[in-house]
Amino acid sequence: MISVDEGLFSPGLKRRTLVFGGAAAVVANSVRIGEAEINDSLKARAARKGLTFGSEVTVRALRESTLLSNVIIADCAMIVPGVEMKWGVTEKNRGKSDYQNGEILADFAKANGMSLRGHTALWHRNTPSWTNGLLNTMGGKDVLLKRVADVVSHFRGRVIEWDVVNEALEPSDNLPGEMRNWPPFAKGDPGYVAEAFHAAAEADPGALLFYNDYGFEYYSDGQERKRAGALRLIEELRKRNTPLHGFGVQSHLKVGNNFKANVFRKFLADIAAYDLKISLTELDINDDRLPYDIAERDKGVADHAQAFLEAAFDEPAVTRLLVWGMSDANTWLNSDRPRQDGFKHRALPLDENYKRKPLWHAIAKAFDNASPR
Ligand code: XIL
């Protein structure tokens, strides 16, 4: 048994107690993780092809269900914290760092042989309120670079892959290079992005440093511009000798959007041509355009993901897939992108009772069909 003691997540407990048993089976209410499941787990199927499978997780979700840790440990070789490393959490009060929940997840990963992604050092959302108005002043740049150095050095040697900069592109802001209109990137200057990567490399020379963003997956004018903006940004970073090692394609999909495999594959090949690794970092599938019927929705979601993953895994530079949560019990879509009919999304590989859905099997099949890396 590989399990996590409930005490692990009790507030106030500094070190966690982890329980490792001998048998391969964990029986927890309705969820049974036995020998067969472990051999056909998503992480095992991925590993056979030189790929890594992982999931987003939060301390809050782990505390809400003791079953979640079991399914994460069974299927995942990597985890990424949903909120615990974001600036608004780690430095809510200026100068007072709070890594408590990030530490819990780092320890959870280590104790169970999972690697850790870092998410995210620099992002225009989830910034602490004390930064309001400060970032576009003369001292703003130093504040930002200090933030990057702080969080990356705190987890030095433990995070193998960092999203150093998240979502710096926004075509609808109409700035040069499709840069987002956020103080550091105002007027389209990618200089801050480069400096953030330099600060991260100094803080942890061993980590793989990624640029991460959404809106590259579909065929539309806005996404054409965003793909072009990303390639231009990489070019600008290269010119500045930036230590950039990888590119994160968030992969927040939506059934009904126009996916063209050849367009997406070409984009991945263009990124790979810069000798960058590609991770699919936040896969989930918004099913708002599908009717309530569960079987129909599960099939629609699985088919959509399968077409996407098959195209993605065609590109050898794609080496990791992370889902933004394992279970429908934990998708952010219900709070941040609710279905119009008010029903819950079925966006993730496991249902609310941690049972495998057609999406789980679609991911498994995509790994099985992938060529070895
Ligand atoms: C999301 C979290 O999952 C939510 O809990 C929060 O309300 C908003 O942020 N792109 C990202 C992630 O890079 O950090 C976001 O995470 C989802 C979109």
Image: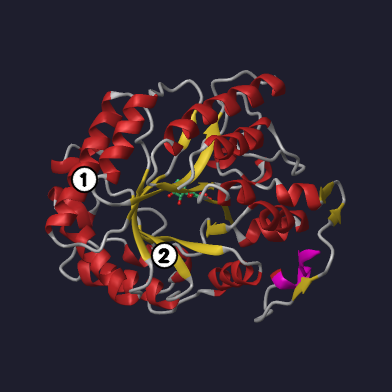
Q: Secondary structure at mark 1?
A: loop
Residue type at mark 1: give it.
Answer: Met
Is 344 displayed left or right of 132 in the figure? right
Tell me the crowding category of disc 1: few under 14, some 14 to 19, or many 20 or more residues within 10 angstroms, Cα based: many
Q: Is residue 3 magenta?
A: yes
SS category of the residue bearing label 2:
helix
Name the quarter where the N terminus is drawn. bottom right
Left-right relation of 140 to 91: left
Please indicate, yes or no, whether residue 39 appears anywhere in the rendered image.
yes
Residue holding disc 1: 179
Give the mark nearer the N terminus: 1 vs 2.
2
Task: Name the residue: 38% across, 41% down.
Answer: 214
View extreme (bottom): residue: 14
In the image, taking residue 230 as reference, residue 154 lies left or right, namely right
Q: Which residues are magenta?
A: 1-8
Please tell me which residue is depicted at 69% across the width and 79% down the height of the picture.
Answer: 13
Q: Which residue is found at the position 48% from the left and 72% from the top?
A: 158
User: The residue under label 2 is which amino acid type?
Assistant: Trp
Residue 364 location in percent, x, y? 62, 38
Alpha carbon distance from label 1 to label 2: 21 Å
* Percent position of residue 162, x then y: 40, 62
Q: Which residue is mark 2?
A: 87
**Which numbered mark, 1 or 2, is in the foreground of this view?**
1
Determine the residue positioned at 78% across, 47% down. Answer: 36
Q: Residue furthest front?
A: 372
Where in the figure is residue 140, as x and y percent of width and height?
Answer: 22, 67
The crowding category of the residue bearing disc 2, from other C-alpha atoms within 10 Å (few below 14, some 14 to 19, many at least 20), is many
